[in-house]
Amino acid sequence: MKEFTIPEDGFVLRTESGRPVIELLVHDEGSTLSLFDVDGEPRVALATRGNSGAALVGDPATNGIVLSAAEDLSEIAILHSGKHIALALDPKRGEIRLVNADQATVAKIYEDDNGGQIGLGDQRGTLAASAGAGEHGGEFCVMNTAGKTVVFLQSNEREDAGNITLLDQNGDLRILVDSSIHVIRDGKIVWTTMNQ
């Protein structure tokens, strides 16, 4: 294989008309290789920095794909029209995130200490619903437009039972359904089917 010696800071290959085709930049912590399109715009980039690497295809401001890998985090992002979906993995957890053109997160799937979780947001990124594994099984929450929980469903410690909790816009408990139905006002049960 033939070897070439290049300048310490890299080089640029150009066409006879001066249009850049390939650029290699070398710096103290790594290097960057860029490939240009027919208009002289960079369209593919590969980069190293320390023990990490990254690749970019397209233009991250409009549409493209970004890949990065490091010891503490690996990530893939697909971008188009200002929106993007990203998959990130680290040694402890994984996450998939969908972001709209206003850069608000509208959906997220992730892992926590209990297991898998999902969050759904409105176009402003305010959490509207969430579901996932809880300490005693599944949990599901519905939020109002202010982001406060108004409906909460969960399984409880008994395998054959679950709870439904309805709250008002202030977060105060109004109705609790478990093995019985309870109506609550000002923190006190005012009606119940328990022992009826």
Image (cartoon, helix red, strand yellow):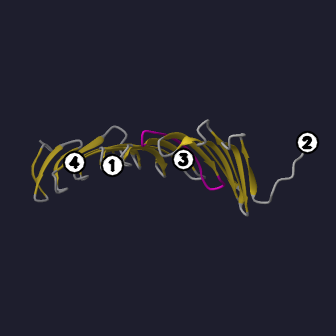
Question: Measuring 87% from the left and 48% from the top, which residue is drawn there?
Answer: 4
Q: From the image, tell me which residue sits under label 2.
A: 2
Q: How crowded is mark 4: few (under 14 residues within 10 Å), some or many (20 or more)?
A: some
Among all residues in the image, which is located at the extreme bottom? 28
Q: Residues within 10 Å of mark 2 (few under 14, many from 20)?
A: few
Q: Which amino acid does label 4 sit on?
A: Asn
N-terminal-most mark, 4 or 2? 2
Name the amino acid, label 2.
Lys
Q: Which of pointers 2 and 3 lies earlier in the amino acid sequence?
A: 2
Marks 2 and 1 sit apart, C-alpha to C-alpha, by 54 Å
Q: What residue type is labelled 3?
A: Ala
Tell me the quadrant of the picture where the N terminus can be found. top right
In the displayed structure, would residue 136 be above or below residue 49?
A: above
Where is residue 34 shown, x and y percent of the image?
A: 66, 46
Magenta span contains residue 162:
no
Label 1, on which residue? 125
Residue 21 in the image: x percent, y percent?
69, 41
Res. 12 in view: yes
Which region shows up in magenta?
70-82
Q: How far apart are marks 1 and 4 (CA)?
A: 13 Å
Q: Is mark 3 on a helix, strand or loop?
A: strand
Residues at marks 2 and 3, CA–CA distance in whole angstroms:
39 Å
- Of labels 1 and 4, earlier in sequence is 1
Which residue bears the numbered disc 3?
88
* Front position in the image: 60 or 107: 60
Sequence-wise, the earlier of marks 3 and 4 is 3
> Looking at this rendering, what residue extends furthest in the front direction?
17
